[in-house]
Amino acid sequence: MKAKDLAKLLNVSPATISLLLNDKPGLSQSLRDKLTAQIIELGLEDMLKNRPSSAKPSSASGKRKKRNDAPPSIAYISYKNDEMWDNFYSFYNGVLEGAQQEATEVDLNLSVIYRQAEKDLVKAIHRIGHVIGAIIICDEPNADVLEELAALEVPCVFIDQFDPNFTVNSVNVDNRQSQYMIVKHLKENGHRDIGYVSCTWEDSAGDERFISFRRAMKDLHLRSRQEWFFSAGDENGPLDSSILEERFRNVESMPTALIAQNDLQALRTVNALKHCGYRVPEDISVVGFDDNPISRVCEPPLTTVRSSRHRIGRECVAMIQRLVRLNETDTLRQPMKISISTELVIRDSVKDRTKG
């Protein structure tokens, strides 16, 4: 049996099983004993043979137990303000939950820090205690942010960062796979004229989605038309569709489908189309991105893309553990980037034009 299959069988992460089978630090002794007993009960004790000392606690956990120390911590640092957090809450809350679950399984604490509430980030980290790494939420990892984080002297992992000017460790949504999946679904449903709705708010993730959309159109032999690239205006205030309404009315002809940068823009798109006299999806289909709760209550409910937020959070914790291990062994390392695949959630906002 493969380690990942064993992890699924025991309902723990592959990282947890890897730490156990390789007798690495990062698991509580109680969790080690519990999992070891379950593996033996399943008759899979051969998988434990490579462990140098399966019956003994790892040196790190054993030392902690003797000193009665608290387990190490990971900081979850958000550079987003409250208003922006509200808009992104659904995504980042899921990431936070996944990170918390993974941290708990490997006997680590997770502490949330809102950067705007702290005068000195280094002091905030020191208040937590033994911090081994940090998960970072920010729009762009600019030079000031990177300099501030470098002062923490712990490995940092960014969520959803694509800016080529800043090479950082990151766990990302696979935008290229996502946009290809959306465009392919529309093409299979008879759509050849496809447009894109972005927001004015510029960030590397949004740019990556648009670039991926254009690449998907090319790969699937569909022609992109500049007049069908629409900007919805400020990302805040999704119910205000006045800017899109004006742009829809001024274009000579409309596509049969529009892909929005995210579900909030998709909602504005649906509202703007209705105000302009178009029916969704009878006249124009709309696809969102993120599977925000708003996508389910929109009329019609939105076809959208769902990212594995919990998986992203878990991978952030696992990446920090790998970075710590690589640092301890002085292994030559470059920043790591992991892309997590998505799934298409099909609802009622796309018309199948192949059925007439």
Image (spheres, rainbow, N blue to C red):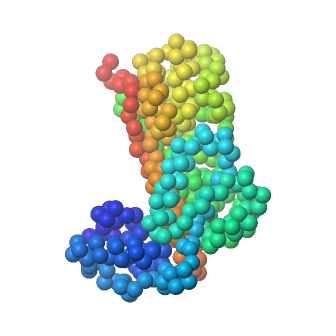
Q: At 60% from the left edge and 52% from the top edge, which residue is drawn?
A: 162
Residue 135 placement (x, y as % from top left): 59, 60
Q: At 57% from the left edge and 31% from the top edge, which residue is drawn?
A: 265
Q: Nearer the viewer, residue 111 or 178?
A: 111
Q: Find residue 229 and report its image quarter.
A: top right
Q: Is residue 306 visible?
A: yes
In the shown orientation, is residue 230 left or right of residue 222?
right
Up-down: is 186 above or below 68?
Answer: above
Residue 224 placement (x, y as % from top left): 53, 31
Q: Is residue 157 visible?
A: no
Up-down: is 348 above or below 252?
Answer: below
Q: At 43% from the left edge and 28% from the top edge, which residue is drawn?
A: 301
Q: Nearer the viewer, residue 18 or 27?
A: 27
Q: At 39% from the left edge and 27% from the top edge, which residue is drawn?
A: 348
Q: Can you name the residue that lies furthest to the left here?
A: 43
Residue 308 placement (x, y as % from top left): 45, 50
Residue 266 placement (x, y as % from top left): 53, 30
Instruction: Name the quadrant of the C terminus.
Output: top left
Q: Can you name the residue that lies furthest to the front here?
A: 68
In the shown orientation, is residue 8 left or right of residue 335?
left
Up-down: is 24 above or below 181?
Answer: below
Instruction: Name the quadrant of the N terminus.
Output: bottom left
Q: Nearer the viewer, residue 279 or 194?
A: 279
Q: How many marks?
A: 0
Q: Find residue 36 and report its image quarter.
A: bottom left
